[in-house]
Image: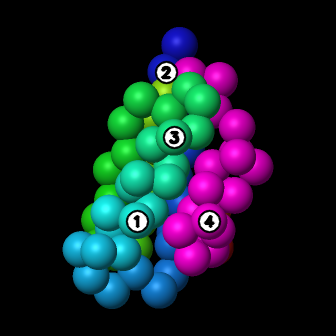
Amino acid sequence: MTELLTYTVAGMTCQHCVTAVRDEVSTVTGVQEVAIDLETKRVEVRGSALDDAAIRAAVDEAGYEALPAGS
């Protein structure tokens, strides 16, 4: 079953930021797709058995903070 987790990641200002976040989040177990909208700072993660803490840690590793979308 595919899950969808959505975050707001402030501080992303360029394509390099997007690539850094996508590359880190893509390494998390269960992640199948990472879609990022730079303009809205929205990050959508699709996959199975997604681990919220691991995804947030990956975003942190990229140098940003992931908050639940709408926060």
Instruction: For marks 2 and 3, give the CA distance.
Output: 17 Å
| In front: label 2 or label 3 | 3
Magenta-colored stretch includes residue 56: yes
**Contact between labelled residues 4 and 2, with CB atoms less than 8 Å apart:** no
First in sequence: mark 1 vs mark 2: 2
In the image, the segment drawn in magenta is 48-65
Q: Amino acid at mark 3?
A: Thr
Please name the residue that numbered disc 1 is placed on: 20
How many numbered marks appear?
Answer: 4
Secondary structure category for the residue under label 3:
loop
* Residue depicted at 24% across the width and 74% down the height: 15
First in sequence: mark 2 vs mark 4: 2
Image disc number at residue 39: none
Please name the residue that numbered disc 2 is placed on: 2
Q: Amino acid at mark 4?
A: Glu
x%, y% of residue 55? 63, 49
Instruction: For marks 3 and 1, give the CA distance.
Output: 11 Å
Could you say which is closer to the camera, residue 31 or residue 43? 31
